[in-house]
Amino acid sequence: MDWVEQVAGIRRWSRGGERAPHKPLLLLYVLGRFQRHGNSPILFSAAEAELRNLLKEYGPPRETSPGYPFHHLASDGLWLVETTTGPGSPGPELGRLRESQASGRLHPDLARALAEEPDLVTRIAGFLLDANFAPSLHADLCLLVGLDLETPRAAGRIGTNGVATRRDPAFRRRVLMAYEYACAFCAYDGWLDGTAVGLDAAHVRWWAFDGPDEPANGLCLCAIHHKLFDKGVLGLSPERTVTVSARFVGRSASAQDMVLALAGRPVRAPQPGLDPVDPRHIAWHNRQVFRTPARTF
């Protein structure tokens, strides 16, 4: 069995195109546990707080329950749930999962394959990361779930037709050139020995969600503003001004200068003749990533 394809086929809840990384987040958490503890059962009540934090940090902007992926992943042939009364999940309700002492573990066939194929954890985790999260979030997410991915991965994704799609290596160069090697939010423009340093080409609509490798879907951002943009702290208004989440708290002078003071600031425009960010990609980021509401200024 090709376990990466099996993971790629997991069923997702869907409404209006909203991101639904609940099952991928649970799988990443479980893979991290597998690396450290093998396929020992994971008691829901013991993992609930960590799963809730994962969903809060990396899930959609709306609040969601860790009970949903713990229960529903069992329908995909990758995960088994049992209670004190026997096999089977009691449902997604938190109270029932706690009271029944529900626990979950990987399907034995998958656990056996992971033990026999040393790179399988890396390949499955790599697919889950590439298919669901912006690249700037991968390292922090792996750290949070305790995943150690040492094997280099190809920069590609598996589409719904099963065909691998690779990133355009020219995307970064084209975006940085369009914004004249300066952060579109703060104008940082550092160089070291003739090479731009600390500047990224950020996707507005994430590449994992069919965001094209085109300048009209890109912004040149410094490393910190790229991370904050992908975490939903920063966003774009339809008028292409910077929005700052009211849920962000920063009391230092640095936070004031680097984040809060950006609210309402016009985003740097690309060079004349080059396309600014497409409004459709701005709308996607506002729906799927930005942590509403925006601060007033």
Image (tube, grey):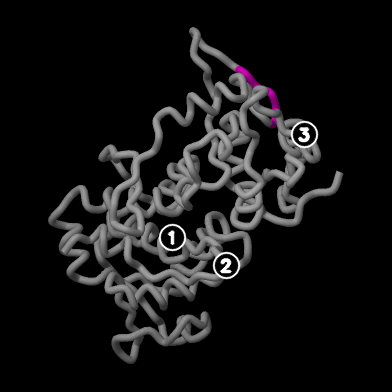
Crowding around mark 1 (Cα neighbors within 10 Å: few <14, some 14 to 19, many 20+) is many
Residue 125 drawn above or below residue 197: below
Question: 258 or 16, which is in the foreground?
Answer: 16
The segment highlighted magenta reads 185-189
Mark 3 surroundings within 10 Å by alpha-carbon count, few (fewer than 14), some (14 through 19), many (20 or more): some
Instruction: Give the Cα separation between the discs numbered 2 and 1.
Output: 20 Å
Q: CA distance from mark 3 to mark 1?
A: 35 Å
Q: Amino acid under label 2?
A: Gly
Residue 266: give its label.
Answer: 3
Residue found at x 48% / y 24%: 173
Q: Which residue is mark 1?
A: 25
User: Badge 2, how many Cα within 10 Å: few under 14, some, many 20+?
Assistant: few
Sequence-wise, the earlier of marks 2 and 1 is: 2
Q: Is residue 188 magenta?
A: yes
Quarter where residue 252 is shown: top right
Q: Position of residue 215 (x, y in %)?
A: 55, 33
Task: Where is residue 258? Give x, y as percent.
Answer: 72, 32
Which mark is first along the chain, 1 or 3?
1
Identify which amino acid the numbered label 1 is placed on: Leu
Looking at the rendered image, the disc whose residue lies closer to the viewer, 3 or 1, is 3
The residue located at (69%, 31%) in the rendering is 185
Res 77 → quadrant: bottom left
